[in-house]
Structure formats: structure tokens, C-alpha cells
Image: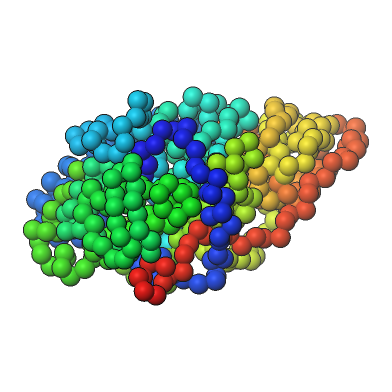
Amino acid sequence: MDGVEPDAHETPAADASRSRRREIHGGRPRWRRRLAIGLVSLVVVGGAGGAVAAWRLNSNITKVDVSGALGTDRPTSAPQARGAVNILLVGSDTREGDGNDAIGKVVEDPGQHSDTNLLVHLSKDRSWATVVSIPRDSMTKAPPECSPTAPKDQWVTRQWNHNYKIGGIGCLIRTLEGNTGVRVDHYGVVDFRGFQSMVDALGGVPVCTREAIDDKESGLRLSAGTHTLQGKQALAYVRTRKSVGDGSDLGRIQRQQAFLSSIAQKATSSQLLFQPTRLYGFLDAATRSLTTDPEFGLGTMKDLAESVRGIGLDNIEFVTVPHEAYEPDPNRVQWQESAQVIWTAFREDRRLGQEPEATASPSPTASPLTVSPDEVRVEVRNGSGASGLASQAGAALAVQGFTVTATGNGERRTGTLVEYGAGQEEAARTVAAAFPGATLEEASGLGRTVRVTLGAGSENVVEVENRTGTKALPDQPVSAPKPAPTPTPTIEARPADADICGA
């Protein structure tokens, strides 16, 4: 969470932080494992105060329906991932609301930004979870003016936390879904006042800083060592950036992650759980500054919490989106190609590093085709990076009788994806027959059009058995690049003892 103006830059030293990454399998910091408790601490104890207390807590939550801002082209879950849950958790620096305008430095046009962004994936069998932290200064494609209808080939490059300022949580979700192909099932937003109130209700939260902090903007002064921070101090601590370490936002993410671990431990300690008055005070503070979608009330949270009780502490991964310097402005970052490994794993409900399960399912085109190409409308997208691949494929489909409605660029991916609307599976099988190895997937918002996205490793178009027309397929000199070796995502994390003074 940060109160600086949206165009303020990081210090040049930010680049140094980006080089300090550690592979996921290189170790499991204790604070990251402890997030198993932190993810559900609030909702697990939600029913402890009885039905009346639960009703009051649920009524505290502000529920906002943003479905109208999400468009009709939202991603759908792969069959093997149905039942998994993706939750976007946002920390907002809004100055609106009682108490928020007195927090942080004064700015002429403060607006509101999503300066803490966590995407939580709960596996469908609730045996593991992965939490992804998204840097606020990420430069990604975003819908112009947060339009819910603008096609992705018209999206513009924009700083991540500006999406929330321009169009609120709906714009942020649409941007996330469009860049990752991961559908967001629920969201939760907490503002400055809510964060501060939760810490106060806990009686303070312990932190350890390995260097002294003297931050002029927030007024925070701490000596090196262990401190128990109250709400106002805690907020300053997680927002402090320029006066600590290399001054980067990425270093601040690490401090925020460690602070979440401390909150998790305090919120699930016996000191709180077995003192009903203090417990209710904490829950009341948490829910009063919480905004969610209409379906994500206290009851849904409690159900989810109960479903993940069996997750072991070693079955939580906490990662930061792999990133690199953004060339037009080195004080910003852009996602690395290896980030696709995370999004693919989420879409397929796989743990990071886990290989896709082999399937014995027959090829989608193994049985005779029942729809003629001249009855099919096709849109071709190029997600491979090879210039001209979509238009080349479109020409090879057109001579076989397909009606090609559009060609253009699409989301980067590996392999060929054929998407179809409800009732169009047979038409999609005819299209898939032209692309060896294609994967079929049902999607919303397509109507009668079948959409093909060509990624790295896609095969060029071949003839389908029931083609119409007699012209030979045109030459296809453009080939999709071979898939890059599967990279191992990296995380912005410190060794476990970095949070322990004297270690």
C-alpha cells in the first residue's frame, strides 16, 4: 500500500532488487508456509460469535457487483480445474471514507490505487494453495478507458495500479483475466483504515527490521531489532519504500509478505481465539473496511475456510510474478515470459512444477466430422509471436470452405487452442481437425464463432476430411516457434532467517 503520486518513480537502485531471486524449489521460508493459516484465519473463526454476531459481521461487509465491467469474453476453467477457486485480494490506498484521508502524505489528486495485489488459487481438492503477488508498477496490456467490450487487440499498455484508479476493482479483474486467462471467482478489497484497525484490534503485530528506519514521509522511526507495531505504525511500515533497503517497491513487497505472516500468527493465536470479546473486535474491524463481490459474504468465506482446514503448512506456495525492467522506463517492470507457467498452472489446477497429467482421452477429431467447413465461422489469433501466422492460417482455412471472420494477435500461449460457444462443439471439432494436436475448450461470449489461438509449437494448417472447394492449400512459409523449455518461476523472497533478528 503506497500513498505516493501515481507517476512517482522508484530509485535506480530498484534494479538491484530484481536480480535477487530464488527458485521455488530452493527452499520454503517459514513465513511463506505460515500463510496457510493467514489465508483463512479471518474466515475460520467467523462463526465463533454465534448467529447474531455472524449476521452483524456479514452486514459490515460492503458488497459491490462489478459483473458489468468484466465483459462477455471472460476466461472459463478447464474441465480439470472446475471446483478450484481464484480470489483476488487488494489493498487500496483510497483516501475516501472516515479516517482514510488522514493517512499518508498529502497529494493533490490522490485517487485510489491497488497497491497490494494478491491472487489466491485454492485447488479443487483443497489440498494445496498458491498465492501470487503482482507488483504495483507492472506494465501490462489493459482495456482502453477500462472498456468491458474492447477486443484485446485494441488494449493499451498501462501501469497495473492505475487500472484500479481508472475503473475500480472491475477494471482490475478484467485486466488480470485478459492477461492471464485465469478467471477470478471472488474478490476482496481492504483500505488503509481497515488495515490499521485490524492491527489495533490484534493488540499490535511484531516485526523485525535488520536495519534502522527513518522515513520522513510517514514519520516512521524504528531502531534495528524487534518491535510490536500498532495500527498507525504498522501501516507506515508496510508502505515505507524509499528509506529502506534499495528503495524499491519490490523490496516493499517482501516486507508486506513477511508482515502478513506475523498477522496470521497473531490472528490465530490462542490469545485471540479463546477470548470472544477480542476475537469479535478483530472480526468487526476486519469486516467494516472490507468490500467484496455479492457472493463472497461471511458464509462463503467460512465454507471455503472449512474446506481448506486439511491443507498442510508445506502445501502453500507464495510467489511473485517473474518480472524484468520495462525498457521504456526502467523504474517500471514488465512480466517475463516465464509468468505463463504460473497462469497455465492456475488454469489447469496444477501445482507449480507439476507436469500435466497424461490423458487417455481420444483425439477430439478421432470420430467422423459432422459439420461441413462451409457452415463454420472462424476467428484466428496469433499467440506465438511469429509475424503473419494468423493470416497465413486464415488463408489455408478459407480455401477449405471455412468463413474466416477475423485474424489478429492473441494471448501468448503454447500449442493450439480451439474455443467454442455452447452448442458449437461439433463445429469446433471440424476446425480442430485442421490443426494437429489442438486442444478444444468451451468459452463464453463466442456465439457461433469458433476462435483459434496459435501458440508456440502450433502446427500449420492441414486439410480436413470433409473440406469443400478444390483449390490446393496455399504455401505456409511461416512456422510457429518451438516452445521454450519450461522455465521455473522465481519468487521475490528472503531466506527464513531474514525475518529473525540475530539470525
Q: Is residue 215 above or below residue 349?
A: above
Give 395 or 168, whichever is nearer the viewer.
168
Which of the 4 image quarters holds residue 152? top right
Q: State which quadrant residue 12 falls in.
A: top right
Task: State the image coordinates of residue 75 (x, y, percent, origin top left).
Answer: 52, 42
Query: Quarter holding the C terminus?
Result: bottom left
Instruction: In the rendered view, tell whether residue 194 sits above or below residue 43.
Output: above
Q: Position of residue 338 (x, y in %)?
A: 62, 54
Report the front residue among 440 and 290: 290
- Say left or right for 305 vs 147: left
* Type of colouring: rainbow
- Residue farthest bottom in this picture: 503
Give 67 or 218, whichever is nearer the viewer: 218
Q: Is residue 197 left or right of residue 364?
A: left
Where residue 50 sits, quadrant-wise, is bottom left
- In this rendering, the count of numbered labels is 0
Evaluate whether residue 387 shows in this view.
yes
Nearer to us in this view, 482 or 165: 165
Which residue is located at x 36 percent, y 70 percent?
A: 500
Q: x and y percent of residue 196 in the render?
A: 23, 48
Taking the spot 71% from the left edge, 46% from the top edge, the residue there is 455
Q: Quadrant of the N terminus?
A: top left
Residue 163 against residue 51 in the figure, above or below: above
Left or right: 236, with 24 as reference point:
left
Whole-percent x and y of residue 497?
41, 72
Judge from the rendering whether residue 22 lies leftward or rightward of residue 118; answer left or right.
Answer: right
Picture residue at 30% right of the left edge, 39% below the top: 104
Residue at (9, 50) in percent of width and height: 52
Q: Is residue 120 visible?
A: no
